Amino acid sequence: MMRRHYQRFINGSCDEDTTDVLFVESTASVSPPTGLNLQRDTCSAPSSPRISYGAKSEMEGQRWLPLEANPEVMNQFLRQLGLVPTWQFGDVYGLDAEVLSLVPRPVCAVLLLFPITEKYETFRQEEEAKIKAQGQELSSDVYFMKQTIGNACGTIGLIHAVANNQRYLEFEPNSPLKAFLLTSAKMSPEEKAAFLEKDESIRVTHESSAQEGQTEAPSLDEKVDLHFIAFVNVEGHLYELDGRKPFPIVHGKTTEDTFLEDSAEVCKKFMARDPQELRFTVVALSKA
């Protein structure tokens, strides 16, 4: 049985003394770990190849207080913005088939937190150049936005997850999140980012949720090297949505039944690029 650890995050940086969550790849029966220590993260937009994602990154404007890497905090954040809790985020404790079978179904979105390393940045630049040269077919129904706010990758991941699954989700009357999605639906990714910068309802709710975690929030200027992205199924294709990238990434075909497993395969590729890294977290949005 091979064991790897991954840490729980949402939105950013980590301290090495934080307790890890057990990530298991095996054929043995595995029970989810309990009594986990929680941690907070921040993240930033692309900067130089030296990977300095702190206060001197490209996002020297707004910076938000990081959210805690806790599905309960994520769910509370979305409830406060008017999402009816018929679907809930929960931890994914491993990526092998048996552990994935523990995740409630159906699943409509997956969030991955991973470390931004030199290996990853090299891959990202090569991937972008390849797609620009070869092109890719994107559905016009994909909701995608850029990230221009520091410490906001977790929030943007949540927006991506919800925006691309509105056919399943329910909203309260006068939901601020629903209003944001309706108003921004036809905007460009850059316009959506600018619109988020001006949305007081989401910002205030974000700050409120950040205060509800079980760990102390770090400084807004803390150096960071981790990032959250979302995976969604749009018209039978698996999309990776990352506000640091110029466009969505298509990872082939998928179905409602295989979406979680297909997303897990892409997550494994992120891990394989940095086999010495332990800082990975996966959460899934499942029907409650």
Image (spheres, rainbow, N blue to C red):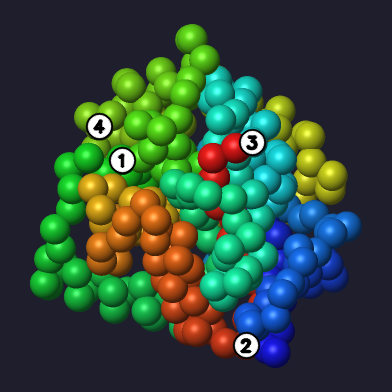
Q: CA distance from mark 1 to mark 4?
A: 9 Å
Q: Which residue is mark 1?
A: 143
Q: Secondary structure at mark 2?
A: loop
Left or right of 252, for residue 51: right
Residue 163 disc label: none
| x then y, percent, for residue 53 | 55, 62
* Image quarter in which the N terminus is found: bottom right
| x then y, percent, for residue 239 | 32, 56
**Do we see residue 46 in this rendering?**
no
Disc 2 crowd, CA 10 A, few/some/many (<14, 14-19, 20+): few
Tell me whether circle 4 and circle 2 mark residues in contact (CB < 8 Å). Answer: no
Q: Which residue is mark 3?
A: 75
Left or right of 47, for residue 235: left
Disc 4 crowd, CA 10 A, few/some/many (<14, 14-19, 20+): some
Mark 1 or mark 4, which is nearer to you? 1
Q: CA distance from mark 3 to mark 4?
A: 26 Å
Figure check: 85 above or below 221: above
Tell me whether circle 3 and circle 2 mark residues in contact (CB < 8 Å). Answer: no
* Mark closest to the chain's N terminus, 3 or 2: 3
